Amino acid sequence: MSNSAWNYELAFSRNLGLLSPEEQSQIKDVRIAIAGMGGVGGIHLITLLRTGFQKFHIADFDQFELANFNRQYGANLTTLGANKADVMAELGRQINPDADIRVFRDPLTKENIPQFLNGCQIYVDGMDAFEIRIRRELFMSAHRMGMYSVTAGPIGFSTAYISFSPSGMNFDQYFGFEPSLPDLNLFARFLAGLSPRFLHLPYLDRSRVDIKNHRGPSAGLSCSLCAGIAAMEVLKIVLRRGNPRFAPCYQQFDAYRGRLVKGRLWFGSKNPIFRLASAYIYKSLNSIR
């Protein structure tokens, strides 16, 4: 089909009944930033595009490799060695030729993050789980710039997710990040805050977690769960529907165990439950390092 035959209203007409025509039109003008186009970031982009969002800033400096095939949307034999952001932008334009997808190929830093986020209303986290410090810079910058943020992490066969409001608790307050702490401490705090109830631990083989090389078990089905949840959180925020829950609220759905837990981590990182959880995770990670 040529671009001249493209019609936004027809392409997304099956959304109607779940979204009103006015809501479907409204989301066309929302600009979303997604850092990372790998396991979760790539499918975040595709899911949001198929929902009808069409303005994005996406960032990734990495290239697709064979080890990405089990979970990353853009990974296939034709994209080996190609930049992830370039590949996902092209796939996105094949879904919506009118999509305005701005690609950032350089590694994100404290200095260029404001440029990456500029003009966006929402930041959706697609960073690798081990990229702790730059993740913190992204969330804190988004908060300072008055943006909402959403993270949905693929943990085991589950998704654990938290949203942040620019008028509420920020990333540092919730996760207790202190830049002077070693990376392993920060990683433990991130995991503790993301999934305080540890739904995935009973079946996770922790011997497969490689801290040194930043590798761990990650399933494609979990990335798909994350994308659906993240898109729903974005819709709730943008359309002011469905009573979105912001930090210190957390949620985790484990598909393997068929369980959903949700709670409120009062006082964030100062909560005794968080302190116990982060200490336990740090001890466990330190033992397998």
Image (tube, rainbow, N blue to C red):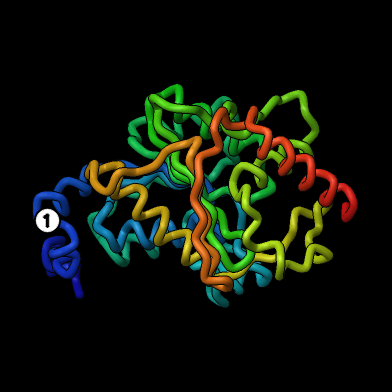
Residue 57's spot in the image, x, y percent? 40, 43
Q: Quadrant of residue 137?
A: top right
Identify the residue at image location x=56%, y=25%. 111
Q: Quadrant of residue 182?
A: top right
Q: Is residue 271 above or below residue 263?
A: above
Q: Is residue 103 visible?
A: yes
The single residue placed furthest to the left in the displayed view is: 21
Count of labels in the image: 1
Residue 74's spot in the image, x, y percent? 50, 67
Q: Nearer the viewer, residue 257 or 37?
A: 257
What amino acid does circle 1 point to? Ser
Identify the residue at image location x=40%, y=27%. 166
Q: Is residue 43 above or below residue 171?
A: below
Is residue 214 shown left or right of residue 3?
right
Q: Nearer the viewer, residue 84 or 266?
A: 266
Q: Is residue 124 above or below residue 24?
A: above
Residue 251's spot in the image, x, y percent? 50, 51
Q: Nearer the viewer, residue 49 or 209?
A: 209
Residue under circle 1? 20
Q: Where does the N terminus fall, quadrant-wise?
A: bottom left
Q: Nearer the viewer, residue 142 or 271?
A: 271
Identify the residue at image location x=61%, y=53%. 62
Residue 188's spot in the image, x, y percent? 73, 43
Secondary element at tag 1:
loop
Q: Is residue 89 visible?
A: no
Is residue 10 shown left or right of residue 111?
left
Identify the residue at image location x=74%, y=40%. 276
